[in-house]
C-alpha cells in the first residue's frame, strides 16, 4: 500500500501490463437476457457477456513474462520429460518432500488422496471444507468434521487468523472416535469458503503436534497458500522477520502430504501431490497413471508444468504475493465505508459480500447469495460466485442444507484488474445495496444431485429483475 498526498492509501501494482485482453460492457437489458439464458447461474454465463470476470482466480491469474518464457522450453516427452524434473526439484526445494506426483488440477489430487486413504466410515477432521474435497471424501464412504475456531464464522471480526483449527475440538474428536477412524486431518490454507481466511503458523504447528502424538497423517490443501503466506508474514508477530521461503518450509515440515491446485498456487493450470511416505506414494502412483496420465506429466500440459515451476518460485516473492491481498483489502474497505456488509478482516482470493446481511429479507431456501450474484451481474456486468446454500448438497430427506455463511465472492485474479475496475465495482455494488429491497430470491428449474452449483439452473421467484433494470436506467440515465 502506498500513501498519497491526501492521506489516502492505495495498492500499487508491482508490475506493468505488456499483453492485454479487450473486454466489453454490454447494455443492462442484454445482461439481463444473458442471465436468463444462464439459468441465473453465473457459472453458465458466456464470457463474451461478462465485463469483469470475478468468478474465480482459478487458472485466470495473469502470468509473468518469466512464466511465459519458460513455456517455450517445455520438454514434450510422454515419459521422463525434463520439464517434470524441474517441477519436481522446485517442489522438493520448497516443501522438502521426497515424492512428487503431478496432476491435471486440484480436485484430481483430492480424488487420489481420498481413494487411497478414505474408507467406508472414515471421518476426516478439517478446519473447513472445500466443495470438491468434501465431495471426494464422501464419494469414498467417508464424512467430514469441521473444527474451525469460533471466530471463523463471524462475518465481522478483527481476528486475524479465522482459518485456524480449534485444537481442543480436534483432541476431543480423536478421543471420541479413536485414531483408526481418522485417515487424515486436512488443513486448508487461505480457507476458501469462509472468505479466504488464513491459519497461523502457530496453529498448524499445534495441529501437527496433535496429529504426530496420535500417529495421524496431516494433509495440507495448499491451493491458496500464497495468500496465507502473505498473511502469516504481515500479521503474525513471530514471523515478521522470517522470509516467505522460511515460513513455507516451517509449514511444510508440519505436514505429511501437501497437495495443491496449480490453477491457484503457481498461477498456471495443473496440480500436484507432495509426500514422504513411500508406501502411500506407491499406491497413489498407480491411481495417478490410471486417472491422470504417466507419472511425469499427470494430465498436465508440459507448458503449464514449466509455468507452475516458475510461478512457485515467484510465490516466494513478497512483492508478488502481496498484490492480491492488497487489492482485496482496498475493495473490502471501500465497500465497508459505503455501508455494504463485507467479510472482515479482508482475506485472500477475493472480496466477500455477506449476502445474509445484504439481502436479509431473502430466506436461505431462496438462495440469497445466488440472487445477489445474479443481481450484481445484471447491474454491472461483474460475474461473481455464490458461496452459500446453493453450493451445498441437499440432505437425504430432500431439504436444503443451509450454509453457515451466504457469501458472494468477487475474486480478484492476480494482476488482472486495475484500480479503476475496482472502483467501478465498488460504485455499482454500493448502488445495488441502496436498492437491495428490489432483489428477491431464486428457485431451481433443473437441479443436479452432486455439485449442483456448477450446472444447476434457476429462475427468479418473481419479475424482480425487470424492476431492478428499470430502476438502474432511471438512476444512471444510461444502460451501461
Ligand atoms: C482450497 C481449494 N482446494 C481445492 C480446489 C480444487 O482445485 P481445482 O479447481 O484445480 O480442481 C480449489 C479450487 O478452487 C480450492 O480453492
Image (cartoon, rainbow, N blue to C red):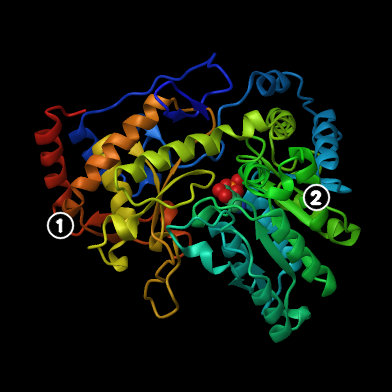
Kindly identify which numbered label has been placed on residue 188. none
Task: Give me the residue at 53% from left, 50% from top.
Answer: 196
Between 229 and 287, which is closer to the camera in this rendering?
Answer: 229
Write down the quadrant of residue 29 in the picture.
top left
Q: From the viewer's perspective, tell me whether residue 428 is left or right of residue 55.
A: left
Q: Is residue 99 visible?
A: yes
Q: Residues within 10 Å of mark 1 (few under 14, many from 20)?
A: few
Secondary structure at numbered mark 1: loop
Q: From the viewer's perspective, tell me whether residue 130 is left or right of residue 361.
A: right
Give the mark nearer the N terminus: 1 vs 2.
2
What x and y, as percent, mark residue 237?
Answer: 69, 49
Task: Give me the residue at 37% from left, 75% from top.
Answer: 399
Dividing the image into 4 quarters, which one contains the C terminus?
top left
Q: From the viewer's perspective, tell me whether residue 13 is left or right of residue 262.
A: left
Task: Give me the residue at 15% from left, 40% from top.
Answer: 469
What x and y, as percent, mark residue 75?
Answer: 79, 25
Residue that mark 2 sits on: 250
What x and y, as percent, mark residue 381?
Answer: 30, 35
Q: Is residue 49 visible?
A: no
Residue that mark 1 sits on: 462
Q: Residue furthest top?
A: 18
Write down the quadrant of residue 473 in the picture.
top left
Secondary structure at numbered mark 2: helix
Task: Give me the residue at 50% from left, 57% from top.
Answer: 194
Between 69 and 187, which is closer to the camera in this rendering?
Answer: 187
Which-is-in-front pick, marks 1 and 2? 2
What x and y, as percent, mark residue 23?
Answer: 37, 23
Q: From the viewer's perspective, tell me whether residue 231 is left or right of residue 1.
A: right
Between 307 and 97, which is closer to the camera in this rendering?
Answer: 97
Cα–Cα gap, marks 1 and 2: 53 Å
- Placement of 325 over or under 476, stated as above or below: below
Total numbered labels = 2
Amino acid at each position: 500500500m502506498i500513501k498519497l498526498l491526501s492521506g489516502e492509501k492505495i495498492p500499487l501494482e508491482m508490475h506493468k501490463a505488456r499483453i492485454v485482453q479487450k473486454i466489453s460492457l454490454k447494455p443492462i437489458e442484454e445482461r439481463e437476457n444473458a442471465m436468463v439464458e444462464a439459468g441465473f447461474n453465473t457459472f453458465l454465463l458466456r464470457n463474451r457477456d461478462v465485463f469483469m470476470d470475478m468468478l474465480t482466480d482459478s487458472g485466470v491469474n495473469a502470468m509473468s513474462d518469466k512464466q511465459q518464457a519458460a513455456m517455450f522450453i517445455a520438454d514434450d516427452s510422454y515419459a521422463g520429460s525434463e520439464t517434470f524434473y524441474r517441477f519436481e526439484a522446485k517442489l522438493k526445494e520448497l516443501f522438502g518432500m521426497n515424492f512428487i506426483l503431478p496432476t491435471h488440477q486440484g480436485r484430481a489430487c483430492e480424488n487420489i488422496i481420498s481413494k487411497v486413504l478414505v474408507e467406508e466410515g472414515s471421518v476426516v477432521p478439517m478446519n473447513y471444507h472445500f466443495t470438491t474435497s468434501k465431495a471426494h471424501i464422501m464419494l469414498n464412504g467417508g464424512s467430514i468434521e469441521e473444527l474451525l475456531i469460533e471466530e471463523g464464522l463471524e462475518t465481522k471480526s478483527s481476528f486475524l487468523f479465522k482459518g485456524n483449527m480449534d485444537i481442543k475440538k480436534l483432541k476431543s474428536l480423536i478421543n471420541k472416535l479413536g485414531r483408526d477412524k481418522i485417515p487424515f486431518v486436512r488443513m486448508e490454507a487461505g480457507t476458501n469458503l469462509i472468505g479466504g481466511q488464513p491459519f497461523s503458523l502457530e496453529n498448524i504447528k499445534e495441529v501437527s503436534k496433535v496429529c504426530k502424538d496420535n500417529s495421524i497423517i496431516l494433509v495440507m490443501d495448499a491451493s491458496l497458500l500464497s495468500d496465507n503466506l502473505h498473511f502469516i508474514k504481515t500479521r503474525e508477530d513471530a514471523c515478521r522477520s522470517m522470509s516467505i521461503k522460511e515460513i513455507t518450509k516451517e509449514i511444510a515440515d508440519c505436514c505429511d502430504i501437501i497437495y495443491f491446485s496449480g490453477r491457484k498456487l503457481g498461477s498456471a493450470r495443473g496440480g500436484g501431490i507432495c509426500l514422504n511416505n513411500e508406501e502411500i506414494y506407491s499406491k497413489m502412483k498407480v491411481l495417478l497413471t490410471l486417472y491422470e496420465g504417466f507419472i511425469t506429466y499427470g494430465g498436465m500440459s508440459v507448458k503449464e508444468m514449466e509455468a507452475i515451476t516458475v510461478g512457485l518460485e515467484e510465490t516466494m516473492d513478497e512483492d508478488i504475493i502481496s498484490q492480491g491481498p492488497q487489492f482485496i483489502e482496498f475493495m473490502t474497505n471501500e465497500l465497508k465505508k459505503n455501508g455494504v456488509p463485507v467479510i472482515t478482516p479482508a482475506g485472500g482470493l477475493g472480496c466477500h459480500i455477506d449476502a445474509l446481511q445484504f439481502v436479509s429479507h431473502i430466506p436461505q431456501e431462496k438462495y440469497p447469495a445466488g440472487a445477489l450474484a445474479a443481481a450484481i451481474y445484471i447491474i454491472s456486468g461483474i460475474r461473481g460466485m455464490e458461496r452459500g446454500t446453493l453450493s451445498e448438497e441437499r440432505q437425504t430427506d430432500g431439504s436444503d442444507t443451509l450454509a453457515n455463511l451466504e457469501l458472494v465472492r468477487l475474486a480478484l485474479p492476480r494482476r488482472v484488474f486495475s484500480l479503476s475496475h475496482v472502483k467501478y465495482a465498488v460504485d455499482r455494488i454500493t448502488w445495488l445495496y441502496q436498492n437491495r429491497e428490489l432483489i428477491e430470491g431464486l428457485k431451481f428449474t433443473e437441479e443436479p444431485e452432486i455439485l449442483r452449483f456448477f450446472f444447476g439452473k434457476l429462475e427468479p421467484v418473481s419479475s424482480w429483475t425487470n424492476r431492478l433494470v428499470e430502476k438502474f436506467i432511471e438512476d444512471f440515465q444510461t444502460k451501461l
